[in-house]
Image (cartoon, rainbow, N blue to C red):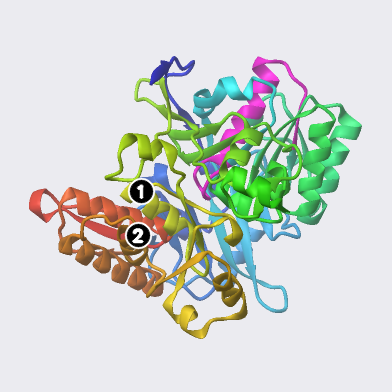
């Protein structure tokens, strides 16, 4: 473990919220301004015929009893920028985003007004990586801060290092709406994209026409954009981008985006080579050099996992080895703690045996990959999620599918690969499977009940769109309930004091 000094000791946020409120109908604006925690406002939702809502991280606040009228929508539409083909508009020189819902004839019947904030200081945790000149791919769940980091990276490279930076801004997410970009990008230049389908063409145009040293782009999501990224990398231009997915395994399993990390292909080994490697005859290997040198997983705003050599880590994962990124944690004083991520070993095995054996490779068939990954981390078992059934030791599926035996599953069951079935695609059932596979001590009844309660509350929160309060639990069980809510994409918070402290599941 080591500490790295940070150049900024605080994070500053600007949101231009007054400019967003200015375009809203006066009676809705007044109710928003009366809300508590206005500084944490995420978005305002206006749907025709329904109550307007203000959405905050932990709750949804109704904005009065009156339903939204068409006049309210027309009031806003007349005061904001033009909606483009992706049904998004904005307010000039701000980062706010207004997205439209339309009916079947194209009329706008709803607006989602997302508050955009420029955050200064977030880049310090990985500033040395960004200044290295290497191609960087950012991953992370929606809302974790990928676009914010892109914006500040562009500003730092343009202003502090004096580099020629071009931002390819598909939906004006990075530099805001209007012809004049938001000051948050500094001296970086911005190319707007007429429609999302043309993003790959504008990426190439940026390199051919404007001689950038750095190209910054948000959300690479198609094969054409992947090919454009490779072209940019091959021309020696630093590319900093985000892509769909939360971690490296998501990219390896995504055939559309796997080319960003070199592409994955199945290779048949000779009998002698398979014996030498102690693997099956068919294995997965990387096809080509990756388009990016470094991969950064943004796990939350203060915790990043950095893979400094994408080619090396992809090769290791395809061999069934666990990735060991460099984990960086932002400290309250602005410093950064850096350490290698530990990979838990199989409980109960002697140290020498643990060092020799490979992790158990599990391929989820109709089972949530993210929940399986979370269960592996929570239980600390020596397992990894396989990216292909032929590279797996165990195929995990559902009991209902195991009984029906669909063609693809029958093909897997013909091989030597072991097939295991669980009764439900839930965190508790997946954890029970791992506990049985690794012969862990039997589960805690209180823990099982707490997770069952959380699952039921999550279902109610999703169906009814309102917060659901659970029974009081001690800190360890509350932490598991928070993790389960996060796995389902919901928010959660603890409330109450002492023995009455409990978790509230919050819909998003």
**What separation in Å lies between label 1 and label 2 (alpha carbons)?**
10 Å
> Which of the 4 quarters of the picture holds residue 212?
top right
User: Does the magenta segment cover residue 154?
Assistant: yes
Query: Counting other residues with Cα less than 10 Å from the Cα at mark 2, is it few (<14), some (14-19), or many (20 or more)?
Result: few
Identify the element where label 2 is drawn. Answer: helix
Identify the residue under disc 2. 437
Residue 83 lies, in percent from the top left, at 72, 58
- Which quadrant holds the C terminus? bottom left
Q: Is residue 321 visible?
A: yes
User: Does the magenta segment cover residue 455?
Assistant: no
> Which of the 4 quarters of the picture holds residue 30?
bottom left
Q: Nearer the viewer, residue 233 or 482?
A: 233
- Which quadrant holds the N terminus? top left
Residue at 74%, 54% in the rendered image: 222
Identify the element where label 1 is drawn. Answer: loop
N-terminal of the pair, mark 1 or mark 2, is 1
Q: Please determine whether, in this image, residue 248 is positioned above or below residue 505.
A: above
Question: Given this view, does label 1 or label 2 mark the residue nearer the observer?
Answer: 2
Residue at 81%, 35% in the rendered image: 232
What segment carries the magenta color?
139-167
**Tag of residue 381:** 1
Apparent side of residue 96 relative to residue 491 in the rendered image (left or right): right
């Amino acid at each position: 473990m080591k500490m790295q000094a940070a150049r900024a000791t605080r994070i500053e946020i600007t949101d231009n919220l007054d400019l967003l409120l200015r375009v809203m109908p006066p009676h809705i604006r007044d109710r928003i301004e009366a809300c508590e925690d206005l500084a944490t406002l995420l978005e305002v939702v206006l749907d025709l015929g329904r109550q307007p809502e203000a959405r905050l991280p932990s709750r949804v606040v109704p904005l009065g009893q009156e339903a939204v009228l068409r006049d309210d929508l027309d009031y806003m539409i007349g005061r904001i920028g033009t909606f483009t083909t992706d049904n998004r508009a904005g307010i000039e020189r701000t980062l706010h985003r207004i997205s439209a819902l339309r009916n079947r004839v194209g009329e706008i019947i709803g607006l989602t007004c997302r508050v955009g904030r420029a955050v200064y200081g977030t880049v310090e945790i990985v500033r040395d990586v960004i200044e290295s000149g290497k191609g960087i791919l950012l991953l992370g769940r929606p809302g974790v801060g990928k676009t914010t980091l892109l914006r500040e990276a562009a500003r730092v490279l343009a202003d502090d290092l004096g580099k020629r930076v071009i931002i390819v801004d598909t939906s004006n997410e990075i530099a805001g709406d209007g012809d004049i970009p938001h000051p948050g990008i500094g001296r970086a230049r911005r190319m707007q994209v007429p429609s999302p389908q043309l993003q790959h063409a504008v990426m190439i145009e940026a390199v051919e026409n404007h001689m950038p040293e750095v190209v910054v782009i948000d959300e690479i999501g198609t094969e054409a954009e992947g090919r454009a990224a490779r072209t940019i990398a091959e021309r020696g231009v630093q590319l900093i981008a985000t892509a769909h997915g939360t971690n490296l395994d998501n990219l390896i399993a995504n055939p559309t985006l796997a080319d960003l990390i070199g592409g994955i292909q199945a290779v048949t080994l000779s009998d002698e080579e398979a014996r030498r490697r102690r693997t099956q005859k068919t294995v997965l290997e990387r096809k080509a050099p990756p388009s990016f040198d470094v991969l950064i997983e943004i796990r939350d705003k203060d915790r990043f996992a950095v893979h400094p050599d994408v080619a090396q880590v992809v090769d290791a994962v395809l061999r069934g080895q666990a990735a060991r990124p460099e984990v960086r944690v932002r400290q309250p004083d602005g410093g950064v703690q850096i350490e290698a991520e530990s990979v838990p070993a199989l409980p109960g095995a002697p140290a020498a045996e643990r060092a020799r054996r490979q992790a158990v490779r599990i391929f989820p068939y109709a089972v949530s990959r993210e929940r399986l990954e979370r269960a592996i981390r929570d239980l600390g078992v020596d397992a990894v999620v396989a990216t292909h059934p032929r590279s797996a030791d165990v195929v995990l599926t559902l009991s209902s599918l195991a009984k029906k035996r669909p063609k693809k599953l029958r093909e897997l069951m013909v091989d030597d690969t072991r097939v295991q079935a669980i009764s439900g695609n839930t965190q508790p059932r997946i954890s029970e499977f791992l506990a049985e596979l690794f012969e862990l001590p039997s589960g805690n009844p209180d823990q099982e009940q707490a997770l069952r309660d959380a699952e039921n509350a999550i279902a109610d929160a999703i169906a009814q769109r309102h917060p659901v309060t659970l029974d009081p639990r001690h800190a360890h069980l509350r932490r598991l309930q928070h993790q389960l809510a996060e796995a389902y994409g919901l928010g959660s918070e603890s409330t109450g004091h002492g023995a009455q402290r409990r978790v509230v599941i919050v819909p998003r």
